[in-house]
Amino acid sequence: MDARSEAEFREFVEARSLALLRTAYLLCGDQHRAEDLVQGALAKLAPRWRKVEEPEAYVRRVLYHDQVSWWRRRSRSSEHLVERPPESPASTAASQHPTDHASAVDRRIDVRAALSKLGPRQRAVLALRYFEDLPEAEVAHMLGCSVGTVRSQTARALARLRTVAPELADPRPQSSTPAEVHP
């Protein structure tokens, strides 16, 4: 890689690393694994830097495919490691009404746990659609599937989340009249 290309690559890495790390974290649910995914994807991009037209899309696609490959290898194992032991339903009932910082943290933990119960494709679709706010067509292009597949995977993932994590339902009352809205 010549000096100019190396400078462009470094600039890209500095500008987009945090966003790529966030995407990788949403895909795998583990900070260390996310860092490894980003590092591997950037290592695959470096020798192709001059040839790749859309480097961020390329890296995101590599992140997704590497995570799926890792997940498939791990699924063959009979042992499943988790970050923390599962909680009993009684201990999670107290965190149903977010009113302070601790409740917000509990909610993020619940979201992380719920996402970990999804398959890699469903997690990727939700991460790209709702956390990265990408349009369906771009998600389909990145994942190498059709827009219809993105839509069906999104619907299935959301339905699964409603089943495995009903505690994530919005606890605020749903209102349709302005008089019921609270500041």
Image (cartoon, rainbow, N blue to C red):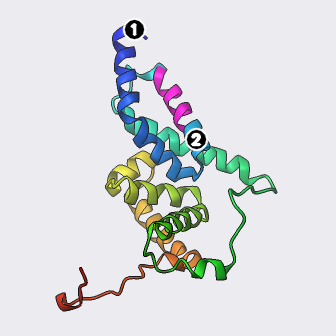
Q: Quadrant of residue 99?
A: bottom left
Residue at 40% in and 65% down:
151
Q: Taking 183 as reference, is 168 left or right?
A: right
Residue pointed to by mark 1: 2
Verify CB contact (< 8 Å) between mark 2 and mark 1.
Answer: no
| Precedes in sequence: disc 2 or disc 1 | 1
Q: Which mark is residue 66?
A: 2
Q: Quadrant of residue 89?
A: bottom right
In the image, residue 72 lies at what x, y percent? 68, 50
Q: Quadrant of the N terminus?
A: top left
In the image, residue 142 lies at what x, y percent? 42, 46
Residue at 40% in and 15% down:
6
Instruction: Rate crowding at label 1 as few (under 14), some (14 to 19) or many (20 or more) other CA atoms within 10 Å.
Output: few
Q: Is residue 139 above or below residue 61?
A: below
Q: Is residue 43 inside the magenta stretch?
A: yes
Three-letter residue code for mark 1: Asp
In the image, residue 75 lies at what x, y percent? 72, 54
Q: Which mark is residue 27?
A: none
Q: Which element type, helix, strand or loop, lies under badge 1?
A: loop
In the image, residue 93 lies at what x, y percent? 58, 82
Most common secondary structure along the magenta stretch: helix
Per the model, the C-alpha gap separating discs 2 and 1 is 28 Å
How many numbered badges does the structure rendering display?
2
Residue at 68% in and 72% down:
87
Start and end of the magenta stretch?
A: 37-46
**View extreme (left): residue:** 178
Say which of 175 and 164 sits in front. Answer: 175
